[in-house]
Amino acid sequence: MNDQVKIKVADLIGSSLCISAEDGQKVFGKVEQLVREGKQVTISFENVTMLISLFLNVAIGQLYGSFGEETIRAQLKVEGLSSDDMELLKRVVDNAKKYYSNKKSYDDAWLEEDNNLEEDNNEE
């Protein structure tokens, strides 16, 4: 049995453009399932021509809500990214770790901000 799986992002989403949350969710769903099964997963960005943080937040950042950092480090590899895209991924991962380590506080802060904006709009 082979416990190593390579996911070619461009093949999975059917595009070289990694720009939508929906496509990021496809990658997340596949990766999450494989990691839960104990597989070693390589996410390949070969043939990807455009990559934005929204996609990475959904595809990879979300994994930090399902797994600990140790699990992700042990079972996940990423290949085929330019140095700029690796920097983007690093920022996404850092933000995801902060968010999921204190999710309730972040969510409460966003909720409070939304309520303040709503009140400001109602006063106009």
Image (cartoon, rainbow, N blue to C red):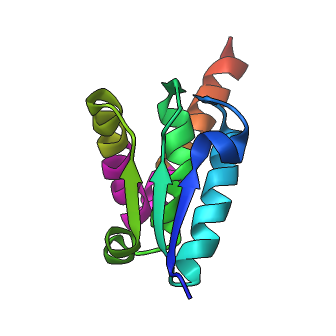
| Residue 110 left/right relative to 101 | right
Above or below — where is 83 with respect to 77? Answer: above
Looking at the rendered structure, the number of numbered marks drawn on it comes to 0
Q: Residue at x 36, y 42 (%)?
A: 89
Q: Residue at x 30, y 28 (%)?
A: 84
Residue 9 found in image quarter: top right
| Residue 34 left/right relative to 61 | right
Image quadrant for the N terminus?
A: bottom right
Q: Nearer the viewer, residue 43 or 102?
A: 43
Q: Nearer the viewer, residue 53 or 111?
A: 53
Residue 112 in sight: no
Q: Nearer the viewer, residue 106 or 40?
A: 40
Taking the view exactly as shown, the residue that stands out farthest to the bottom is 1
Residue 45 position in % (x across, y down): 48, 41
Q: Residue at x 30, y 44 (%)?
A: 90
Residue 82 found in image quarter: top left
Answer whether residue 36 is magenta in the image. no
Q: Which residues are magenta?
A: 92-108
Q: Nearer the viewer, residue 122 or 80?
A: 80
Residue 22 position in % (x across, y down): 72, 42
Above or below — where is 33 with respect to 25? Answer: below
Answer whether residue 101 is magenta in the image. yes
Magenta stretch, main secondary structure, is helix
| Residue 104 left/right relative to 69 | right
Image quadrant for the C terminus?
A: top right
Residue 79 position in % (x across, y down): 38, 48
